[in-house]
Image: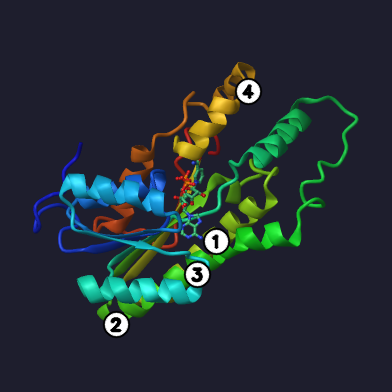
Amino acid sequence: MREAKDPGRGRLAGKVALVTGAGPGLGGAIAAALAAEGAKLVVCDIAPEALDTTRSRLAAMGAEALALPCDVSDSAAVDAMFARAAERFGTVHILVNNAARVPNAPAEEARRNRHYQYLTTPMPRQALDMVASLSDDDWLKWWGVNMHGVFYCTRAALRLMTPQRAGKIVNIASIAGLGTGSAHSPGYSATKAGVISLTKTTALDVAGANIYVNAIACGGVLTPPFEEDLARASDEQKQRLYQMLPLGRIGRPEEYASLAVYLASDEHYLVGQVISPNGGLLM
Ligand SMILES: NC(=O)c1ccc[n+]([C@@H]2O[C@H](COP(=O)([O-])OP(=O)(O)OC[C@H]3O[C@@H](n4cnc5c(N)ncnc54)[C@H](O)[C@@H]3O)[C@@H](O)[C@H]2O)c1
């Protein structure tokens, strides 16, 4: 297990980082990677057991961390979380907007299979009805977490970062927001495209205050939802998936977390950029 660096050492020594959706998936891996570089951590998640996993992980590393339950789709809850963070650590220097509703539930899996079948079945073709069958409630849930949550957290973070003229915001988007790879989940793809757009708009807005905003448009990440997907998939489905990937494998959370650390550091000149680690799936 990696250890948190002694205070005063590491690329992020003296920095306070807040990571949303910091459960056992990518968020927890990013929180651990930031702590390994000396950052103090504020981690939040809507699911208490997910948050506990990361709290224990950070404690085992010897990291200084505050774990707060929070639903990022609730703006008052987000403001209260940032107030607690500022009360404990004085400010926030780094925000990683990672929390999301992800399209890996079994119902979504059935829709994805329908999409893959469509791509590999000869004509005549017919509508997939992914958009026509989407309910208001489902549509709004995608926006509530994936888009409003990113906005609420970004706004609250900027209120701390702008006066101090320093900050790094890393938005976790998806390859689904860049291409058509996730047509089975229009709500997910549309909100992740929205995150990419908000990244650029915000970057332009605050670069003059020395705040750097960038996005990571992840390809496949081997996190618990993806592992559950693979466990349900047939051998043929898995082969089809690996064949689509030039690297022939899914990315590990640590391979994405190292990029988040870099974007959170003072070692680059990147503003408003969307970097997509995806094993070569989209070039
Ligand atoms: N795993 C992949 O293949 C993949 C691919 C592309 C993008 N991503 C992105 O990576 C990020 C992490 O995904 P993951 O694979 O680790 O999934 P995950 O489901 O393990 O992680 C998402 C976390 O967000 C939390 N969350 C959900 N709603 C929330 C809310 N309203 N408030 C606070 N927390 C909330 C969940 O409890 C969970 O712990 C997401 O932004 C996802 O869109 C993942």
Residue holding disc 1: 145
- How packed mark 2 is, by other alpha carbons closer than 10 Å (few <14, some 14-19, many 20 or more), is few
Query: Number of marks in the image?
Result: 4
Q: Mark 4 or 1 closer to N-term?
A: 1
Number of the label disc, if any, that sits on residue 237: 4
Measured in 3D between alpha carbons, the distance from the residue under mark 1 to the one under mark 3, in whole angstroms, is 10 Å
Q: Amino acid at mark 4?
A: Gln
Q: Amino acid at mark 3?
A: Phe
Q: Residue 174: x, y in percent?
A: 53, 48
Report the side of 119 relative to 77 (left or right): right
Q: Secondary structure at mark 1?
A: helix
Residue holding disc 3: 151
Q: Residue 180: x, y in percent?
A: 66, 44
Q: Residue 244: x, y in percent?
A: 58, 27
Which corner quadrant holds the N terminus?
A: top left
Residue holding disc 2: 163
- Please tell me in which quadrant of the rendered image residue 272 appears: bottom left
Q: Mark 2 or 3 closer to N-term?
A: 3
